[in-house]
Amino acid sequence: MTEEKAMLETGWNFDNSYARLPNAFFTSFTPDAVRSPGLIIFNSPLAKTLGLNGEALQSKYGVAELAGNRIPEGAAPLAQAYAGHQFGNFNMLGDGRALLLGEQITPQGERFDIQFKGSGRTPYSRGGDGRAGLGPMLREYIISEALHALGIPTTRSLAVVTTGETVHRETELQGAILTRVAASHIRVGTFQYAANFGSIEELKELADYTIKRHYPEVEADENRYLSLIQEVIKRQASLIAKWQLVGFIHGVMNTDNMAISGETIDYGPCAFMDTYDPATVFSSIDQQGRYAYGNQPYIGGWNLARFAETLLPLIHDDQNEAIKMATEAIGEFNNFYHANWFAGMRAKLGIFNEEEEDEKLIEDLLNTMQEHSADYTNTFRALTFETREDKDLFNSEEFTQWNELWQARLSRQEESKEDSQQLMRNSNPAIIPRNHRVEEALEAAVEHEDYGVMEKLLEVLSKPYAHSQEQTDFCTVPAEINQSYRTYCGT
């Protein structure tokens, strides 16, 4: 494809509504040009959904756009301002190594943020270089696409390009830029920024914009700002329940990493749990286990309380009344979360209806799994297909007793055994992005420029509920689990 043709046919269709908010919420900024951009991976199916021409974007001209060396017509690059609680401490933040290129309007009329990550310094870089290494950007690509395939709301990855430049961290890394696609990048931290550093009018404008963009169904409500809190609570309760059901650990649930849209966002030290243990932590910076697997629902509620605090002036003129209303709304988070989680756990066990003893049945299984250091994903996979791979777990007296209760429970519902098994097949993934498989793919890509390992991993992860023969090798756990395995923010 000629450069002239690529210029005409990349397919960008920008409408930059965020740039029409008050200037306090962002700084217009052009990304730094990079030395020698090279395309590493491109998400052709996602490009098609967005109305983009994948062939054109993979040309030399298109890669220059994906590296920030050329700004597409209609784009309005900007760095977003936000604040946030990081490990419980409030800080002024912002897009320190990211730029919102613009908002792509798809052929279906949907709106998506197109953001560069690793595109260089911004006014919010706080002394950082604004760059990113290839490994962390490929990790985000792999994990975010895996969550999408699992049916979990998430930002997605359109492309990763190398920059031809070196990023200096503890060691020298190959520089890279990821193009991220999101419903928006409005965060709890965006509202914290408005509440702490802006005017009431600016806070109201942000809230109205968020409602119009993500929750238009509450625009006509008598108290739409209270309704906004309630709807965000529902989406986050559903999202975090979905994380728990597949053993996903976000790793850094700071308030600036919680999207108002209800998508998973900001993949840094994220990973999936192998051996079931609620105390599982992979993040190198989470020394106290604040964001451990078992703590994620509680942190979700804490973050949402911080969100509700920002909207108190808009909920009611009387602060005491506003606090009361917000507290009641936040109090519902646990109910929504548990309803979502228990429904998901019943499905993982092939249970269609509800009985009072279901909660104990589920808790007893999880306790037994923890006691016998059972693999989370493979245990539910084994129950689905009635295999008994984990001898330590399945030969235990505790499991035998539990299994009798489970079988009796299944026999009390109208649905057949085949129906239950199909429900379990649809609810228990065959594969997840196992830590050792992700590291294997990243090592091959970064150290040896071998992208075939990653491409194969992405292929099998794209159909986690297929339970196909080719997925078998990717279901196995390492002979010895690396208990000291740590993930890093990649900044």
Image: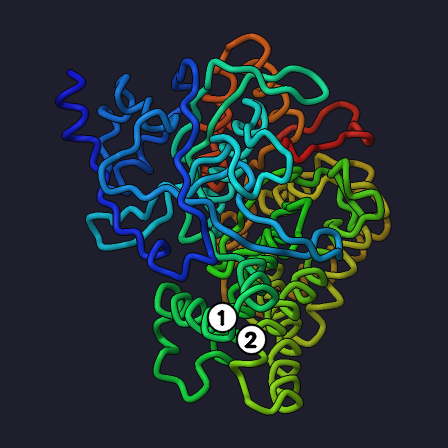
Front residue of 251/380: it is: 251
| 268 to 7, vertically: above or below | below
**Left or right of 352, for residue 183:** left
Identify which residue is drawn at 78% across, 51% down: 278
Residue 271 in view here? no
Residue 157 in which image quadrant: top left
| Residue that label 1 marks | 203
At a point 55% along the width and 28% down the height, the residue shown is 131
Q: Residues within 10 Å of mark 2 (few under 14, many from 20)?
A: many
> Mark 2 or mark 1: which comes first in sequence?
1
Left or right, 73 with respect to 111, comes to: left
Q: Percent from the top left, x then y, of residue 412?
A: 60, 70
In this image, 161 relative to 281: left or right?
Answer: left
Quarter of image, res 159: top left
Q: In front: mark 2 or mark 1?
A: 1
| Dot 1: element | helix
Q: Nearest the camera: 159 or 63?
A: 63
Residue 478 position, x and y percent, is: 72, 25
Q: Secondary structure at mark 2?
A: loop
**x and y percentages locating residue 315 in the rendered image:** 53, 83
**Is residue 413 visible from the viewing direction of this image?**
yes
Given the image, on which type of amino acid does mark 1 rest? Answer: Leu
Disc 2 to disc 1: CB gap under 8 Å: yes
Provide residue 462's location: percent of width, then percent of height. 44, 35
Query: Badge 2 is on which residue?
Result: 311
> Quick one: label 1, few (<14), some, or many (20+) residues within 10 Å?
many
Say which quadrant the N terminus sits in: top left
Label 2, label 1: how far apart the Cα atoms are: 8 Å
Residue depicted at x 58% and y 68%: 195
* The C terminus: image quadrant: top right
Q: Identify which residue is drawn at 52% across, 52% down.
A: 81
